Amino acid sequence: MTMESAPVPGAGRATAVQAHTVHPPRRSGGGAQVRPGGRRTVRCGRLAPLLCVDALAAAAAFVLLVPAGLPRPLAALPAVAQILLLAHRGLYRTRLSPSALSEVPALLGLALLQWYLAVQVLDAWAPQQAIGWTVLAYGAGAQTALGCAGRAAVYRARRRAAVRRPLSTLVVGHGPQARQVTAALFDHPAYGLRPVGLVAAPGAGDEERAGGSAAAPLPVLLSPQEVGRAVVQNSVRHAVFTAPPEATPDGPALLSLLTGHGCRVWLVSGPGAAVSAPAGGRPDHLWGFTARPLRDGTNRPFGHAAKRAVDAVLAAFGLLLAAPVMAACALAVRLSDGPGVIFRQERVGRHGRTFVLLKFRTLRPADAQESATRWNVASDERMSRVGRALRRTSLDELPQLWNVLRGDMSLVGPRPERPYFVAQFSRAHPGYQARHRMPVGITGLAQVNGLRGDTSIEERARFDNHYIETWSLWQDACVLARTAGSLFRLGGS
């Protein structure tokens, strides 16, 4: 494996691990083993202490403050409710720098909600043993104090364990911030992240080698292939990006590769960067760098199986429902423009594979070259009144329901483009090629935000990549609802 080495500032007390070194599996912890290319298994061992602390806090407060006449086994109900509420609030998610004090507002708010519900249930079930508002306040306060103390103890134990058993980590980026983040991880082992390699763009090795001290050089990985080998050989569990993945040509591909190997991925940002706070508390940080977890919407096989099933069902239903409209459109095109009702065009789909997209013909191109390389025909004088009407109402897109049923497309996703323009836009806009990580769609997040026709390609790519990285079935439903609403505002593409 061809690599360069970069010095790590402030790493005189650490020994860097060469990315080509194969390490034996660690038996003492650090999480479940991850098979190459497989998904991370749930680390129940990390959750168990917090679950026990929260359940015991809720049960203890209930036993101490609720009237003695009630059966004590009922204490299990608040414990279960506490765990469910905290899970919904995101207080069991892995964080780089967890703080029990920062979680107090969330713990108190959920405890008040839980005790209020308990008051209402007891009042309806056993009015003679109902508890008052004073007991509710004491109960919520006691539960919060017990939970906060227990969580603080768990976090302290985790930091000590992290120092003893750090997890192999890759730092993705180059420049001063990447060196500062790497140095912070070496100098502060309580984070439990041990850098074993620096992932940089090709040609960045000289810049990395020029900075910092000569102590503990890290291998610089310059290609996704080297990153994949390093992840497998070093059992890498975490990756820290120092710039958004979409800001670099290989960033989205690296994100998919790392999450596909079960790595937990973080994005750290310097001063002035706007980073959303994780659920359940303040924004996370890595030694002063604001941090947030990154996920890749493409690495969710069960979710995408559900997406495909929904696409197939809705496309089949849509074809049946729209059959009379499609027949009328086909007849209008045939009478207005002659034979050749369906227009077929090669488009680029998921992972760069091409397919034949179907539309009602609104304009007969002069030749195949014009069809493949002309950007927009909306103002072409050769277009008939029927063609213009179909484009303004987007009815020309209805045959693409067959593409969805076949599996070429999805109902929601980045709009597919012709190979000629995909090559051009990929060279001009770093994040454009990353749009092909998911199936292309009839409509998408960019389209419902008005980015269709002669609009910014860079902004379209930004919306498409944001859709991919935050994908959910609910987001698809929202895009479809907004698309249905936009049909009443005639525009076309």
Image: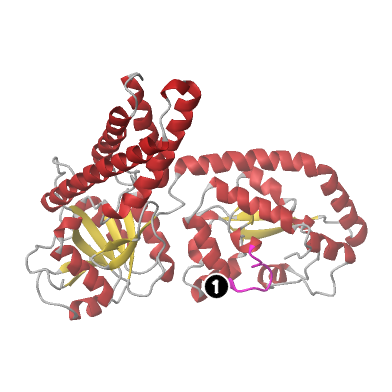
Quadrant that contains the N terminus: bottom left
Q: Position of residue 33 (x, y in %)?
A: 24, 42
Can residue 41 be seen here? The reply is: no
198 to 325, vertically: above or below:
below
As drawn, is 180 to the left or to the right of 347? Answer: left
Q: Position of residue 104 (x, y in %)?
A: 32, 50
- Outermost residue on the left side: it is 13
Q: Which residue is mark 1?
A: 458
Under mark 1, the amino acid is Glu
Residue 455 falls inside the magenta stretch: yes
Q: Regarding mark 1 in the picture, which secondary structure is present there?
A: helix
CA neighbours of label 1 inside 10 A, class few (<14), some (14 to 19), many (20+)? some
Q: Main secondary structure of the magenta part?
A: loop
Residue situated in front as seen by the camera: 465 or 125: 125
Q: Position of residue 30 (x, y in %)?
A: 20, 45
Q: How many marks?
A: 1
Stretch in magenta: 449-457
The type of colouring in the image is secondary structure
Q: Residue at x 50, y 74 (%)?
A: 427
35 to 478, vertically: above or below:
above
As drawn, is 122 to the left or to the right of 242? Answer: right
Residue 398 falls inside the magenta stretch: no
- Outermost residue on the right side: it is 335
Q: In the rendered image, which quarter is residue 287 located in?
A: bottom left
Q: Position of residue 5 (x, y in %)?
A: 18, 71
Residue situated in front as seen by the camera: 345 or 314: 314
Q: Residue at x 85, y 62 (%)?
A: 389
Q: In the rendered image, which quarter is residue 360 located in?
A: bottom right
As drawn, is 9 to the left or to the right of 304? Answer: left
39 to 387, vertically: above or below:
above
Quadrant that contains the C terminus: bottom right
Q: In the rendered image, which quarter is residue 174 located in?
A: bottom left
